[in-house]
Each structure stands twice: as C-alpha cells, then as structure tokens.
Amino acid sequence: MAVKLGISLIAWQNDDLPDLTAAFTTEGAMEDAGRIGYQGVERGRRMPADTEGLRAYLDRYGVALCGGWCSGNLMINDLATEKAAIRQQVEQFAALNAPCIVYAECSNTIQGDIHRPVSQRPKLSRDEVMGYGAKLSELAKWSSDQGCVLSYHHHMGAMVQDAEDIDWLMEGSTDDLTLLYDTGHLHFAGADPLAVLDKWGHRVHHVHFKDVRQPVLDWVHTEDRSFLDGVAAGVYSVPGDPEGCIDFQAITDRLKAMSYDGWIVVEAEQDPAKAPPFDYSKMGYDHIRAVASASGLAIAP
C-alpha cells in the first residue's frame, strides 16, 4: 500500500480570482511542481484541451494527471444531457489513467460569487439531497463503466458543504459514487474532518490536503463574507504552515489505518504576494512526507 503525492496548480493559477495570480504561468507552475517532487497535478483550465496534447504536456514535465475539477449540472439536467456534457472529460481522464474526475454540483452554487456571503449558500432538505444522490449514482456508474471513477467534491458555498450534507449524499447514493475528502472545506464548514473520515472512509477515493487559518475563518463568519473573500484574505494554506490549525498527523494516521492507497493532493489557493507558491507548495510536500513517515504510510517512488 502506497499513496502518491499530487498538487493542484491553483496556488499559481487561480481560475476564480485570476488577478491574484496574473504574474504566474502554467508552465512555471508545472516546472515548480515537478522540481519539488510532486508525482502528479490536477488538470487546470490553461492546459491543452485535447487528450494527446495534454498527454505530451504532462510528459514534458514528468508528472501524471491526478484528477481535475468538473462543474456538474445534474440538478437541472437529465441524465442523458449530463452524460453528454461531461463525456469528453471522462473519456480524456480514462485515456490518461487519471484516478478520478472531481465532480461538484455547480448549477446552484455561490462559491464563485464574491458578492454573496457563504452564509447564503443553498441548503437543501435531506430528501432533496438523497434524491440527487440516487440520480448521481447513475452518472457515477456510467462514468466508472467508461474507465473513470467519479469522486464528489463537497465545497463551501455549494449544496453539499457540511457533514450533514455529506451524510445525506452518501446515504442516498450507491458505492458507485465515491467521495473526495477535503480537509480545508470540512473545517471551513464547521465539520470535524476526523469524524467524517471515520464515518465515510470506505467511500473516500481521493484526498485534498489544505489547512485553515482560524483567525481568517472567524473573520469570514463574523463579517458575513463570501468564500472568495476568505480565499483572498488567506483562509487556506498548505499542510505544515505554522498558522494552520488542522492536525494532519492524526488524519494521516487514519488514512494509514484504513489502508488508503490513492492520491493525496495539496490544494491551497492563496495570494502569491503573501504566500510564494513554490515555497508554500514545498512546505506542504515536506510536511506530508513527514507525517506519512510517522504514520507508516508509504509514498510510492
């Protein structure tokens, strides 16, 4: 059993707040990621769109494709329409042996609206989320049959955000639907990351490690600010940041105990003027290697 370490290039190339990272290129980010030692990167919007072009691009920098975001619209689409909408990405990820497609419902989210406080996010009923889960299971089964696992990303500002939402989604869906486990979004949402992992670890297929600066999170809640306000103010950071509040050793211990052998991906969107991407990404890499070693969790060569 061995995990692989990947990174999202969002620290260098923030698609939601492009002005924040305007001074950085995707090519520079890829070079940095490979130089640090990351084995894979999640797909970014500025990478080549065609499969063979993307394959050559990844090979050039010596990294694998370890997933990538997919904006879902299954709440408003029928199953056939949604399959058609995501088919190209599913087929591409299968061809490139990506571990999963990172799927999140975006038809009703407010995560990308800097003017909408995160407190205004859509909160659905148990029946609504469970019904959505049943429908999503069919999409996940189809995606898996194409050769690409679908992992659901709970996200701040979205309809599946907190531990209760995750419970309902998992209870309403089949094992065809796996869970992307994100430490930073769970803490931001007021959930206990360890409790969620203990309850739904058997459904976790993909892991995002990000830390949280508690004073910034408190400011977001006190001032009723948006998710993007929090990002710009530095609510997130990488594992190993002394300003962070999440115990990654305890989480890694749990991953070892449940024999997790997928990817651990650093995803920490920050202002590069305050948190230089190379330095912080290396900090995250080094910290994960340290806690994995202490847990006895092997990292694939």
Image (tube, helix red, strand yellow):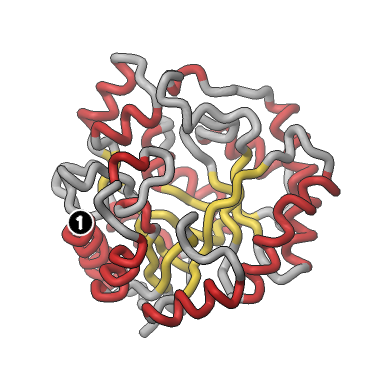
Label 1 crowd bin: few (<14), some (14–19), many (20+), radius 10 Å = many
Q: Residue at x 74, y 46 (%)?
A: 136
Which of the pair 203/10 is nearer the observer?
Answer: 10
Q: Is residue 173 above or below residue 227?
A: below
Image coordinates of residue 12 in percent, x first then y, are 30, 54
Q: Residue at x 69, y 32 (%)?
A: 129
Image coordinates of residue 106 in percent, x first then y, are 61, 36
- SS at mark 1 in the image: helix
Q: Residue furthest top?
A: 223
Residue type highlighted by circle 1: Tyr
Q: Quadrant of residue 108?
A: top right
Image coordinates of residue 109 in percent, x first then y, are 57, 30
Which of the pair 24/226 is nearer the observer?
Answer: 24
Which of the pair 184/75 is nearer the observer?
Answer: 75
Image coordinates of residue 279 in percent, x first then y, are 16, 59
Q: Residue at x 41, y 76 (%)?
A: 63
Q: Residue at x 26, y 68 (%)?
A: 32
Quadrant housing the C terminus: bottom left
Q: Is residue 26 above or below residue 153?
A: below
| Label total for image | 1
Res. 273 visible in picture:
yes
Question: Does 174 sit left or right of 27 as displayed?
Answer: right
- Per the image, the residue denoted by label 1 is 280
Q: Residue furthest bottom?
A: 301
Question: Does 71 sit left or right of 11 as displayed?
Answer: right
Res. 259 visible in picture:
no
